[in-house]
Image (spheres, grey):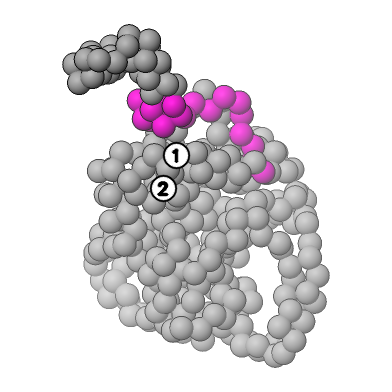
Amino acid sequence: MKKLVMFLVISITIILLFALKPYSSKDEVLNLSLNLANTEIFSKSISAKKVVVQKEVLIENYFNYLDSIVKKFQPLTTYNLNEHLLVRANPWIIDTLQNTDYYRMMAKDSFVYNQKKMIALPMGNTIVIPDSMKAKKILNSFENTTIDINIPEFKLRIYEDSVQLFEFPIRVGRDEKKYLEMSGRIQDLKTKTGKGFIINHVRNPRYVNPVNNHQYFVTKRDDGKVTKLPQIPFIETEINGLRYGQLIHPTTNPRTLGKAYSNGCIGVKEADAWVIYFYAPINTKINIRYDLSVVNEMGDIITLKDIY
């Protein structure tokens, strides 16, 4: 089909050139049309709508692979193509990454020691480059997305305008003060409230114990098994114009969800962390609040436990 389209375009070009330049020689016209057909811009413009994954892409290579697609197709789009836009146009990618969650795999009786060696993009799958209309819709969605966190409720919600898209359980900072070697001072470990934005993504995070500032590479899971740490992006927030180092990131111990357990960060399940990441590009609005009165699923107003 592509060859047929190219043949028709070349044929039309030759006819037009003969009509507009009657005194040009046949060889000149033919050479000009062949040069046009062979230019990189021309050949890309009549294809370049999708990418077929030629071989399995592992988690450890996922970001480089997506970046290479963005780099290749950015010059051909009328919008700012990036990883978040590309993945939101191909939601199957989110599903695949969610299923690398250690506990999801264990539920299938499949032990995973090193998540980075799992398949992120299966061979043969197709990644569609969104057209301008689809891209505009996704970009508009980004602009109207808000991440809402209610600390005593231990909930993180994602809204588009006033519509709730997702709700995830979280853990929050402890109600205590402690000396952290990482910062070199005593810090209040409570999760800070306020409004702000997502300001950074750490796509290959270092896992560091803030108490002693030591980096670690393995983790003990809730089931007692030890695995390597996963490669799932950490999301950095800025609240009330200040950067507290307060991150949204996965926890390898989901038993701690629903508790004041962390050093101030917001912890989520591994699978949930992928969803939050793709719905939270840079400059996404975030609201962290401390509301004790909430409406439950039955529509009743209830008062939560005051954890701080």
The answer to whether residue 110 shows anywhere in this view is yes
Circles 1 and 2: CB distance less than 8 Å?
A: yes
Residue 73's disc is 1
Q: How busy is the neighbourhood of tag 1: few (under 14 within 10 Å), some, or many (20 plus)?
A: some
Q: How busy is the neighbourhood of tag 2: few (under 14 within 10 Å), some, or many (20 plus)?
A: many
* Along the line of sight, the residue nearer the viewer: 292 or 150: 150
Q: Quadrant of residue 29?
A: top left
Q: In which quadrant is the N terminus drawn?
A: top left
70 over 13 or under it: above or below: below
- Pick whichever of labels 1 and 2 is earlier in the sequence: 1
Residue name at image x 80 percent, y 70 percent: 214
Q: Give the range drawn in magenta.
A: 39-60
Task: Name the element at disc 1.
Answer: helix
Residue 51, position as x, y percentages in the image: 46, 29
Q: In which quarter of the image is residue 48?
A: top left
- Residue type pointed to by label 1: Phe
- Residue placed farthest to the left in the image? 19
* Along the line of sight, the residue nearer the viewer: 145 or 187: 145
Residue name at image x 43 percent, y 44 percent: 74
- Residue type pointed to by label 2: Leu
Image check: 25 left or right of 308? left
Residue 143, position as x, y percentages in the image: 31, 62
The answer to whether residue 95 shows anywhere in this view is no
Residue 249, position as x, y percentages in the image: 57, 62
Instruction: Give the CA distance from mark 1 to mark 2.
Output: 8 Å
Residue 81's disc is 2
Task: Name the element at disc 2.
Answer: loop
Residue name at image x 53 percent, y 28 percent: 53
291 over 217 or under it: above or below: below
Residue 69 on the magenta span: no
